Image (cartoon, rainbow, N blue to C red):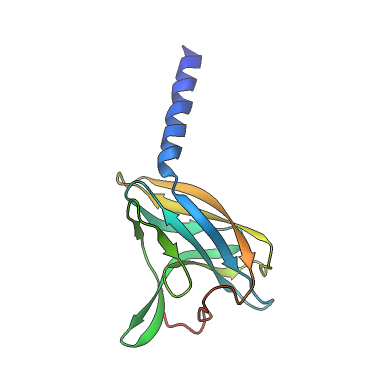
Amino acid sequence: MRIRFITVAFASLFSLMAHAQVNVTDPWVRATTPQQKATGAFMKLESNKPMKLVGARSPVANVVEVHEMATVEGIMKMRPVAAVPLTPGQALELKPGSYHIMLMDLKAPVSTGQKVSVTLMLENEQKVVQEQVVEAEVRPLNAAAAMPAHGQAQH
């Protein structure tokens, strides 16, 4: 009886974990200079069920937030957002100049070639938040489109 209970418990746990997963492609983090205290994490997310990206964390930063870059009254502004919806079957690209994950108050610089662990917090339709760990490669400072330094964008 006890073995059956444990088997059912594990099956339920794996079922829940499978529902939490989104397909993550091309995860990367922009390298920093020695004095730099913030950088961005970028990737493509795709889910087969309605979900929301509601947060993130990383061992390399004391503060991690989901941000949006948007032009408001002709001025590019960066601001934290509470959630970013994932529409089933549509890729959401977290990229410079758009939605992205800010890694702030870095504990140490991040260097090209290093791997950075980022834990995504994903909320399903039942409002249950589940986590998914992503390993992101650190790319050179000039990788992809230029993004204003964190201190230069308006919040």
| Position in image of residue 56 (x %, y %) | 48, 58
Quadrant of the frame with the C terminus: bottom left
Residue at the (46%, 82%) spot, across then down? 153
Left or right of 138, for residue 19 = left
Q: Quadrant of residue 76?
A: bottom left
Q: Is residue 98 above or below residue 53?
A: below
Q: Is residue 130 above or below residue 36?
A: above
Q: Nearer the viewer, residue 118 or 61?
A: 118
Residue at the (48%, 27%) spot, across then down? 10
Q: Nearer the viewer, residue 86 or 60?
A: 86
| Position in image of residue 68 (x %, y %) | 40, 71
Residue at the far bottom: name it.
74
Residue at the (34%, 88%) spot, across then down? 74
| Position in image of residue 15 (x %, y %) | 42, 33
Q: Nearer the viewer, residue 155 or 114?
A: 114
| Position in image of residue 30 (x %, y %) | 59, 70
Residue at the (44%, 22%) spot, across then down? 8
Q: Is residue 20 above or below residue 45?
A: above
